[in-house]
Image (tube, grey):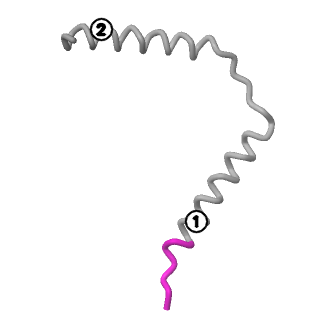
Amino acid sequence: MHPDIHLRLHHIRAAELHSQAKARPRHRSPWSAVRLRLGWKLVETGLRLVTLQRV
C-alpha cells in the first residue's frame, strides 16, 4: 500500500475513534476515586518493598 494512502486511512480511522469516544457517555462510580487512590498506594508500597536495602 502506498504510504500516503496508508496515512490518510489512519487519519480517517483516528477521527472515527475520536468521534465515538466523545459520543460515549461518561459516568463514574462513586468508588472510582477510592479505587484510584488505593491503586496508587499499592504501587507506592510495592516500590518501597522493591527498593528496600537488605542488610
Q: Looking at the picture, how far across and down is residue 50, in whole percent?
A: 51, 71
Specify whether residue 50 is painted magenta: yes
In this rendering, is residue 15 above or below 35?
above
Label 1: how many residues lie within 10 Å, few (<14), some (14-19) or many (20+)? few
Q: Is residue 46 above or below residue 37?
A: below
**Seen from this angle, which residue lies furthest front?**
1
Q: Quadrant of residue 31?
A: top right
**From which residue to which does the magenta span run?**
49-55
Label 2, on which residue?
A: 8
Q: Nearer the viewer, residue 50 or 3?
A: 3
Q: Is label 1 in a helix, a strand or a loop?
A: helix
| Residue at left offset 58%, top offset 65% | 46
For the point 69% across and 17% down, which residue is it? 25
Percent of width and height locating residue 47 = 53, 66
In the image, is 53 to the left or to the right of 20? left
Residue at (20%, 14%) from the top-left corner? 3
Measured as percent of width and height from the top left, residue 44 is found at 58, 62
